[in-house]
Amino acid sequence: MKKSEMPDAFENARTAKGYAKIDDQDDPVVILLRHKDVRKTAHNYKTFSSAAKPGRIVVPSEVHIRETRQLPFEVDPPLHGEYRTIIEPWFKRPLQPEYQAQLTMQIDALLEKILSENSVEVIRDFALPLQSRALTLLLNIPYEEAETWISWGTHVFRSEDTALDGDKANILYDYIDEQIEKAIAKPGEDVYSVLLASDFQGRKLTKEEVKGVMVLTFAGGRDTVINAVTNSIAYFAEHPQSLERLRKEPDIIGNTVEELMRYFSPLTHMGRVVQEDTYVCEHAIKANTRVSLCWASANRDANVFEKPNEVLLDRKMNPHVAFGFSHHNCLGATHARQIMRILLKTMSEKIASIQILDAKENIEELDGFNRKVGYDTLSVTFNPIKL
Ligand code: EMZ
């Protein structure tokens, strides 16, 4: 098996039954595995709600490590839409040419730096700093602030030996509280100030609501982006002809980003809490239990995707759900897509080939399902294109 391969952990269960049952901290989850069921369930918020106890729709559940409701992620329509309407324009700024120019400069500088080194540990030296620095653009705060976030590591709620690390989570909460107080004392043009000044239902957003948006912004787009970037580098290391193709056909980069997102599916799944006794895949599920929408499995469903386990750089029909589906689709997707497009373009222009020196896989364990989501470490050598 190639080091960059990302096997489909759910194929057998998906084809046999369409769902799987797992335990998670004594709060079981029925994972929905088929593309069709995942999409249908994502639409049906009346039966499958996101407005549960904060942390419960995440698997592994975060109910023991947080009380703040992440917004607009942990509410249902119509409230969800009211929050989303005021927050969304800010998260669409990555479409602006000036934003993209700044992001290009950041990615360019980071690539230049690692191209001059013999051996690079991709997560520490590239993906984590890239994610954190790019986030300064999304939040509109000074570039130097990224150093603090880099020091937190790849996940704000997980540490090396603990899947749910309450102490680590507190660092993030205290940090956000502090930033909110600073923005109240001295409003600027940063995301905290903008959110605090937003009108919602005839009043301003509360500190707790702003915190809810910010916890989501820091947590949701962190390991996901880091994995997407790192996995891309591993992929191109083992498929140099693909990098060459992007160099010759830059017009397909948009399709390639979508295809890599489908293949990597950085976020495995997301839960919902069942509101009434119901059925999924002819399987009875009780009110107040959990299901999850398995984006990673849906994205390999052979009923929808031809050759689902292959990366087809210019795949045309690609209704993937890597950024979720329906009203809750990823708020950070515009930013993530820009990062990926610029990364692929810049890599194809500057890098001739990449050698993997060492790779330690990051396997997510889900009560019997072991899914590779990326790497704990990935050491490579980059060989620049000689001009
Ligand atoms: C939550 C989640 C959001 C959760 C879209 O995903 O990402 C996870 O990494 C976090 O742990 O709290 O933000």
Image (tube, helix red, strand yellow):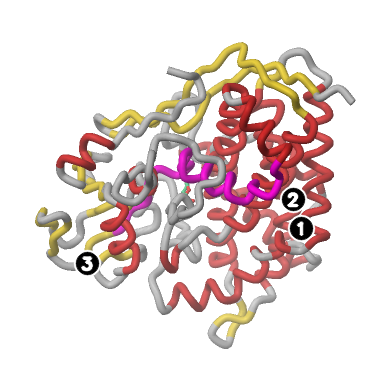
- In which quadrant of the rendered view does residue 213 lie? bottom right
Compared with 91, 198 (above or below) is below
Q: What label does residue 136 carry, if any?
A: 2
Residue type beneath disc 1: Asn
Determine if the magenta segment contains residue 10. no
Q: Residue at x 73, y 35 (%)?
A: 348
User: Mark 3, residues whose alpha carbon is within 10 Å: few (<14), some, or many (≥20)?
Assistant: some
Q: What label does residue 69 carry, if any?
A: none
Q: What secondary structure predominates along the stretch shown in magenta?
A: helix
Q: What label does residue 140 carry, if any?
A: 1
Compared with 197, 188 (above or below) is above
Badges 3 and 2: C-beta atoms under 8 Å apart?
Answer: no
| SS at circle 2 | helix
The N terminus - image quarter: top left
Q: Which residues are magenta?
A: 249-272
Which numbered disc flags the more N-terminal residue, 3 or 2? 2
Measured as percent of width and height from the top left, residue 300 is found at 36, 42
Q: Residue at x 53, y 55 (%)?
A: 216
- In which quadrant of the rendered view does residue 372 lie? top left
Residue 153 appears left or right of 140: left
Residue position marked by numbered label 3 in the rendering: 275
Q: Residue furthest bottom?
A: 202
- In which quadrant of the rendered view does residue 280 lie? bottom left
Badges 1 and 2: C-beta atoms under 8 Å apart?
Answer: yes
Closer to the camera in the image, 337 or 351 = 351
Closer to the camera in the image, 136 or 156 = 136
